[in-house]
Image: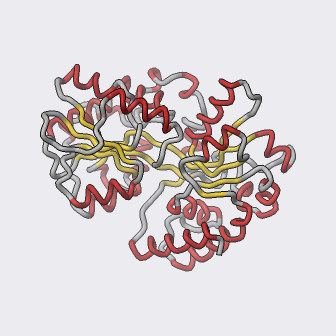
Amino acid sequence: MRKSHLRTLFSASLLCVGISTSVAAVEPGMYLYNWFGLLAPETPKEFEQETGTRVHMDAFDSAEIMQSKVMAGRTGYDVVVATSNVLPGLIQAGVLQPLDRDQLSNFSHIDPDILAQLAVNDPGNRYAVPYLWGTTGIGYDVDKVKAALGNDAPVNSWDLIFKEENISKLQSCGVAMLDSPSEIISIALNYLGLPSNSKNPDDYQKAQALLLKIRPYVLYFDSSRIDADLADGNICAVVGWANGALAAQAINEKANTGRKISYSLPREGALSWSENLVLLKDAPHPKEGMAFINYMLRPEIIAKTSNHTLYPNANKDAAEFVEQKLRDNPWIYPDKKTVATLIPLEPLPLKLERIRTRIWTKVKSGV
C-alpha cells in the first residue's frame, strides 16, 4: 500500500482524532502505527467509548519507514498495519507475535479466499489479520483513450501499456505509473508469461527490456499525484490502484465535467495486496492490542473504514454496511472469477531485491 490519493481529506481526519506525530508510550491505552489516513476518523473515539481504552496513533506513508522502525524494536507500538509482501521479513526477524485465536472472537468474519491469498506471505495465517485490500490495474480516461486508439482500444489487457504501438499513441494525452518497483516489475514479469516473483535473475533482464522499450512514452512515475492528475485530465492512463480511479471518477461526477474515468483489471492478471493488522512481539499493551484487532474484525466497524478510504475490506459479512456504490463497484469488489486471476504481491530474497532496485533506477532514468 501506499500514499493516499485523498491526502488533504485524510490530513483533516487525522487532526480530528488527535493523532500524534511521535509515539511515547507513557499514557494508558493502545498504540497503533498505521498508514496515513487508513482508518475511519470516528473509529478511535468509538473504540474508547466502548472499551475505555484510548487509541494513540502514529501515521506513516512509506513501508520502508515502518519496517525500519519496527525492525529496530522498542517502538512502543502495540498494533501495526503491514502490507502483505512485508510480512515475511517481519516474521523472519521475530518482531511479531502469533495471534491468539481465542482472543479473536470475530475471526470467523474474514473472507477465506483473502486469507488463502495472505497465506502466501503468512503461512498458516498465524501472525496477521487482513484488514483492507486492493488491486493494481489500469485507470484511464475513457474518451481520451478511445480518441487515441479507437473503439477497440485494449483496455482489458496489459497490451494497452506494454505494446509500443498502443502506449506511443497515448503519449500525447499522458501515461503515468506508480513509483513502485515491486508492483510494476511484478506486473511486467507476469505479462511476459514469467513468474511475478521470479527467482531467476535473467527474468528480470527481460522485464527491464520491456519497461525500457515503453519508457519513452511514460510521462512520470509517482505514487502520490497520479490520481489527481487522472481526475484533472492531465493524463489519460495510469498503472495505479482501483480506489484512486474511483476517487478520480467521483471527483468528475461531482464537478459534472463530463469526463469519464474507468478502471480495468486486465485479463492477464492484475496485482493484489492486503493491508494487515499485526501485534508486535514487544507490544507494551498486548491485551488492548488484541482487543483492537478483534474490534476491527466486526463487520459494521471495518465497513466505516472502507467507506472512508474507498478500499475493500477483508470481511465477508461487512457488505451490508458498506455503501452500495462501493459494494456494487466491480473495480473495488471484483467477482470471484476475477479474484481468481489476481496475482498476490510477494517479497523477494535480498539478492533479487537489489537487482529489482537497480532495474527500477534504470527504468526511471530511461538509460
Left or right of 339 on screen, residue 36: left
Residue 180 screen position, x and y as percent: 52, 58
| Quadrant hosting residue 171 | bottom right
| Quadrant hosting residue 336 | top right
Left or right of 59 on screen, residue 245: right
Residue 348 screen position, x and y as percent: 43, 67
* Residue at x 60%, y 62% (from the top left corner): 190
Residue 126 screen position, x and y as percent: 26, 50
Q: Is residue 1 above or below residue 17?
A: below
Q: Is residue 232 above or below residue 189?
A: above
> Which one is in front, 241 or 77?
77
* Residue at x 19%, y 43% (from the top left corner): 100
Figure coloring? secondary structure
Screen quadrant of the C terminus: bottom right
Q: Is residue 257 above or below residue 72?
A: above
* Residue at x 71%, y 70% (from the top left corner): 213
Q: Decide if residue 140 is in sight here.
A: yes
> Which one is in front, 26 or 114?
26
Q: Residue furthest bottom?
A: 202
Left or right of 121 on screen, residue 26: left
| Quadrant hosting residue 81 | top left
Q: How many marks?
A: 0
> Which one is in front, 103 or 221?
221
Q: Decide if residue 335 is in sight here.
A: no
Residue 248 screen position, x and y as percent: 63, 36
